[in-house]
Image (spheres, helix red, strand yellow):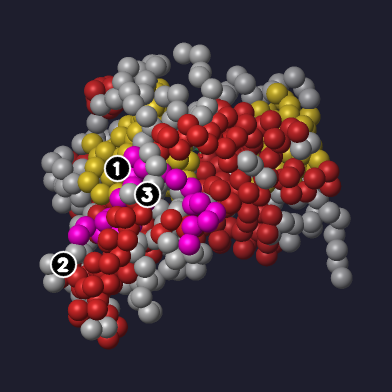
Amino acid sequence: MEQAAPIRSIAIIGGGTAGWMCAAAITKSFGSKIAVTLVESDEIGTIGVGEATVPHLSAFNRLLGIDEAEFVRETQGSFKLGIQFNDWGRIGDSYIHGFGTIGRDLGLMPFHQYWLKARAAGKARDIGAYSLNTLAAPQDRFMASPVDAPPNSPLADIAYAYHFDAGLYARYLRGRAERQGARRVEGKVVSVAQNGETGFVDHVTLESGEKVAADLFLDCTGFRALLIGQALGVGFEDWTQWLPCDRAVAVPCEKVGPPTPYTRSTARKAGWQWRIPLQHRTGNGHVYSSGFISDDEASAILLENLDGRPLADPRTLRFTTGVRDKLWHRNVVAIGLAGGFIEPLESTAIYLIQAGINRLMALFPDAGFAQPLQDAYNEQSRFEYERIRDFIILHYHATERDDSPFWDHVRTMEIPASLQAYIDLFRANGQFFRNGTEMFGLTSWVQVMIGQGIVPRAHHPAVEWVADSDALAFVDHIGKVIEANVGLMPAHDAFLQRCCAAPAMAK
Ligand code: FAD
């Protein structure tokens, strides 16, 4: 056996959400076996957005041993059952991409196949009426699954994510990581030294002259990509041709009512606006394409569409959608914005950080840095980014909107062949084939396809194996069960107050 020396030290460069998630997870998993140093610069600061998540985050929290109530309280958080999309397929349209399942599978067939049959017979409600999350969200109802829920009840497995204050989240993770042994160094990295022979990063030097050396470096420097991009010169594949939004303007505002248990995304003339409800305020932002609208107009649209008084000046952020050619090169792994960016329409960036950490743990190298580990990491990451990219493009492309040059562009543009194949398959008879480990599964694709107006021409032939009256009765029954169970759920705010009311914040 050729067992090389183990990795003894990791330097995480950057202390945003990515840096502190890495530090918290690695110190928790590896304990004192590996020395973890995190370098961050107060002068540069963090991006300060990133406040809506997907349900996978609860698995990350479990890995860290995080108590949910404490976590929600400390981050002024709220619960999220899904995302409401307004004005996407057509102005006036509204649908919800709810987490969790739709209805209940019967035999080999997923529920939506029976729903298609019932719909064709004029006997079905909107697909959302058969999803606990989608029905509960606009009614402002929420609960976590009670431990004593009967296993076949829709309440037994309620899928949810969180909204939280990005600044408080990084602070919360920092506290945990430092208690678990991470060393924090404040300072700005001014140079990156590489080994003359291998090209591996040897150390970084801070403005103060301090040097930080390590076996493995995690580039968490955000859009700067200081190590992977600037030092190692790894290229970036730009996806702007499919996702033309390249800026966002963000502003928090006063909340005017209890936080809703869902994120809202409203399509605008050259992009879309988010609304993220927290306990102490509401987060808002307008993501747009600078090729179709000016910064001033984008800002004005945002400010005209706030629930309450703005609590700060609007802040403009620039970005390019795409991914690094390699996320792991030599002894540098890029995690977070340094590795790539897909706009936050489905709140996937924090998930991609989590997935990067999990993948790194699974493919963790020794000091030999075997190339197959890097290749596997890069291939899997690439796959994951591309599948999420396609899912986001779907929202823009599958639209009837023709009210602005932006919508004309995205509606008529050529899309990746991989996405076209998914759309064609679904249109044929409602089928969806999950490709390997891709993040969004059947219920997500089905809800967004239908929500954006892609309705299959037929259903799966196996649905015909069930007698017509039985299939229709089944769909009807599921709708009634979902409705009755939503009726048992408390108000989201009542649940928050009982479980995890956050302290009042100074204004
Ligand atoms: P940053 O927060 O930018 O952190 C970079 C760190 O590197 C900072 O600590 C900085 O000080 C440090 N640094 C940089 N250069 C140096 C240097 N020279 N020396 C020392 N330190 C340095 N994600 C979601 O999951 N949900 C969302 O709702 C969501 N909304 C978003 C909205 C917008 C408009 C944008 C742009 C992103 C959004 N994201 C969202 C993405 C999310 O914000 C990021 O994935 C997340 O915050 C991680 O950022 P980061 O840690 O990679 O980078």
Nearer the viewer's eye, disc 3 or disc 2?
3
Q: Residue at x 86, y 55 (%)?
A: 5
Q: Quick check: 93 above or below 288?
A: below
Q: Earlier in the sequence, mark 3 or mark 1?
A: 1
The CA distance from mark 3 to mark 1 is 15 Å
- Do the residues under discs 3 and 2 have CB atoms within 8 angstroms? no
In the drawing, does residue 275 fall left or right of residue 152?
Answer: left
Decide if residue 151 is on the left or right side of residue 102: right
- Element at badge 2? loop
Neighbourhood count class around disc 1 (C-alpha, 10 Å): few under 14, some 14–19, many 20 upward: some
| Amino acid at dot 3 | Leu
* Residue at the top extreme of this rendering: 507
Query: Circle 2 sits on which residue?
Result: 123
Name the residue carrying label 1. Answer: 138
Q: Quadrant of residue 192?
A: top right
Q: Amino acid at mark 1?
A: Pro
Q: Which of 452 and 247 lies nearest the eye of the viewer?
A: 452
- The residue range painted magenta reads 125-150
C-alpha separation, residue under disc 2 versus residue under disc 1:
23 Å
Residue 488: mark in rendering? 3
